[in-house]
Amino acid sequence: MKILSDIAALLTGMWITWKHMFRRPVTIQYPEEKRQPYPRYRARIVLTRDPDGGERCVACQLCSAACPVDCISMQPTEDTDGRRSAEWFRINFARCIFCGLCAEACPTLAIQMTPDFEICTRDIMDLVYEKEDLLIDGCGKSSHYNFYRHAGIGVTQPRGNGAEELPPVDVRGLLP
């Protein structure tokens, strides 16, 4: 009976092959016709700005810690008003596997993934993008979020005046 089941499996495989031989091929002529990626497709990384026009990146280095291939590096700096930003921000797309862990780890929503998948070049050093190459003018997918207004950091307003923040509590007043 094992021979009969083997023959049935062989005939099933041949039938599937025979059935697909007469279908029209689905070929896309790539440079002329471009396939539209799915809405949540993750490809090239961009750095976004907050609604006020400032950089969202606070150089917390969580994205470089979350990156499994270590393709992100940056140097933090602080402005005179106390606002943190990245002095330089570098992504090596030759090493990037486009997993999206950096975008998930970013607390300020500065790193976002775009569906732009055409980043091929012959020189591998052209795949190292600096902050100027990554920074876009818009807010990206989340145009309402401003980290410094929501976080309660005393840079743009006093502590306790954030959009979703309660005023500071004197802990000595909580003692019995």
Image: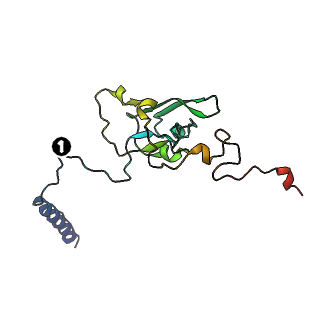
| Residue 112, position as x, y percentages in the image | 45, 44
Q: As drawn, is 44 to the left or to the right of 139?
A: left
* Mark 1 residue crowding within 10 angstroms, few (<14) / some (14–19) / many (20+): few
Q: Quadrant of the C terminus?
A: bottom right
**Residue lying furthest right:** 176
Examine the image and state in which quarter residue 96 appears. top left
Out of 141 and 124, give the one closest to the viewer.
Answer: 141
Write the residue at 17% across / 54% down. 26
Residue behind mark 1: 32
Write the residue at 42% across / 40% down. 45
| Residue 146, position as x, y percentages in the image | 56, 45
Write the residue at 39% across / 47% down. 42
Task: Name the colour scheme.
Answer: rainbow
**Residue lying furthest bottom:** 1
| Three-letter residue code for mark 1 | Glu
Out of 22 and 77, give the one closest to the viewer.
Answer: 77
Q: Does residue 120 lie above or below 17 as drawn?
A: above
| Residue 89, position as x, y percentages in the image | 49, 31
Q: Secondary structure at mark 1?
A: loop
Q: Quadrant of the N terminus?
A: bottom left
Out of 175 and 8, give the one closest to the viewer.
Answer: 175
Write the residue at 64% across / 40% down. 156
Q: As drawn, is 169 to the left or to the right of 48?
A: right
Question: Number of numbered discs present?
Answer: 1
